[in-house]
Image: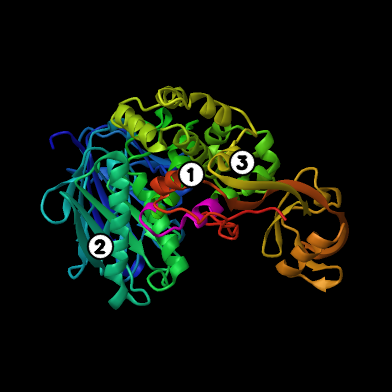
Amino acid sequence: MSDVTHAYRLTLVPHAARLEGELLLPAGAHLLETVSWVPGAYAFMRYGRDLVDVRAEDAETGTPLAVVREGWTGYRVAAAERAVRVRFRVAMADVAWGELAGYVSLEHAVVHATRVPHVRALGGAVRVEWIVPADWAMHHPAGAAAEGSHTFVYPSFAAWLDLPVVAGAFTERTRKEGSTTFHHVFLERAVGMDTELDAFVDDVQKLARVTGEVFGSFPFAEYTFVWSFDSRMHWGLEHANSTLVGVGPLCLVDPEARFSALRVAAHELVHAWNVCRLKPAALVNVDLVAGGFPGELWVAEGFTRYYEFLLTARAGFCSAERFFANVVNYHRGTTTRPGYERTTLLDSSQATFLNHHRYPNAANTMIDYYDAGMLVAFDVDAYLRCRQGTLDTGFRALYTQFGTSASGYTHDDVCSVFAELGAEALIRTEVETAGALSTVERLRELGFTCDVTAVPTLGVVLDGERIVHVLEGSGAEAAGLHCDDRIVAHDGLAFSATGLAWLIAHRTSLELTVRRGDRQHVRIATLGTRREITRLVFEGGTEHEARLTAWLGSCPAVGTEISLRPYDNFHGTERAV
């Protein structure tokens, strides 16, 4: 490409877990920056901390140029009359940021552009020459032009940021769906890998087929799943032509771990359409330092979360009973938060950089646009299916109209598309008004008996014995319990989740001993009540059975009481007690 403005030479140094880089820039003064967030993560991060030893020189004479830090993401390089060479190092040992920024180990590496400096003002294409150990293989996802085996040209820095490069020792499987190629790159070994790996890949391909059917075709010619079996890698991040998924070492042999892996795979694959191509307007040409603040993440992430369950059901990995149990539990987890009555989905989406990570008091101020957005998707789908329509039809129409749009879509655009199906009023009500989900009504219309009753509650959300949230207006708040208190004992007995649950169900008040920092306190909490779905029974007729079967691929038997135990969320489940 003639418009290359950034020419990199990046050397992987496995024993030191770092990159050593050279960057050739045109003449002039330059502001080198690292990004502060990665699309799909929605949180500002300190990636610039890992960029060190930044030096610059006249590329022709080697004369040093002054380099001074500017802000928390960049370095200012003094003006030069000739081309500028920048040398730098990047620490790549922190696997906690692996899906967002990559890492280098002794066995392999996953490398993004996240920690690498660039000059936003230049724009233009980017050329990268990768220097890897002689015995290391490379896998590069589609989306860049190859110039030899280890040099690639990216249309822009943002395009490079969207392409994780894998190098080192890995196992690869390739499958075809029609004319589309799917690569599966496995970074580590897992239990049962020698006998179960191909069956797992075949399962993922089933998901790919049913996903393609939603939209009518695949938007890519090649797609790569990068899989990690390392239990430290809590991955799930989308890219236009690839994704990184962390599934743990028991994924191939443990049914629950396998189901979780398939859901994450479905979720990230849907993102190839929804977010990577079908973009909210605020995420088009986004500022990778200052961020982007879309009000439509209830579509971008909420619809995608809904489809992870719908697609695994259609592929035969999730029963209708488990599908509806999750709908109920997501509803219970969302509607029992005080924030549900005061926060709209538009506001929750737009405030993503405030609420993407859980924090004390979040239950009182915010709802999760992933979870509540999933429920809106379910409500709209159920509403339409009882009226000769489907969410698939509306979702496909939204993608067809805006999937290649240079300006993206807005909330009003979504409403306009679904107006043609008769669902605009429902969407506007549920998304623009706090506390307006119609999930209970939708379940009843689908043929379920849906009991909503008062249940006793202390008013806290727990992570083990630690209090994560204290709900406003609850007995826990009145008793003076605080976030991060740890329940040591209840009624004089050592804490157990089972024991506490029994006491809440059978008492009107509790004596709780909590540890707060280095001190212990005894608090007497009066129990209150909350209303939630407590029982779900399918009692539909033949029309209901046909509707659910066409929708999910299966249907509960008439008279089946749905177990409400399944609650699957790879971000973690939160439930008030």
Q: Secondary structure at mark 2?
A: strand
Determine whether the residue tagged by mark 3 lies in a helix, strand or loop.
helix
Mark 3 crowdedness (10 Å alpha carbons): few <14, some 14-19, many ≥20? some
Identify the mark nearer the N-term, 2 or 1.
Answer: 2
Q: Is residue 223 above or below residue 431?
A: below
Question: Does residue 60 appear to the left or right of 444 in the view shown?
Answer: left
Q: Nearer the viewer, mark 2 or mark 3?
A: 3
Which residue is nearer to you in this view: 158 or 347?
Answer: 347
Looking at the picture, tell me which residue is in the foreground, 253 or 369.
253
Could you tell me residue 76's position as x and y percent?
Answer: 38, 38
What is the spatial separation of the Cα atoms under label 2 and label 1, in whole angstroms?
51 Å
Label 2 is placed on what type of residue? Ala
Residue 551 % position (x, y): 41, 45
In the displayed orientation, state which residue is furthest to the front. 542
Q: Point out the image quarter for the C terminus.
A: bottom right
Foreground disc of the pair 2, 1: 1
Q: Which residue is mark 1?
A: 544
| Mark 3 or mark 1, earlier in chain | 3
The span picked out in magenta is: 314-326
Name the amino acid, label 3.
Answer: Val
The residue labelled by disc 2 is 167
Q: Are marks 2 and 3 in contact (CB under 8 Å)?
A: no
Q: In the rendered structure, which amino acid carries the disc numbered 1?
A: His
Residue 118 in which image quadrant: top left
Type of secondary structure dominating the magenta stretch: helix
What is the distance, in whole Å, between disc 2 and disc 3 at their CAs? 49 Å
Task: Determine contact: label 2, label 1, CB under 8 Å.
Answer: no
- Residue to which mark 3 is pinned: 440
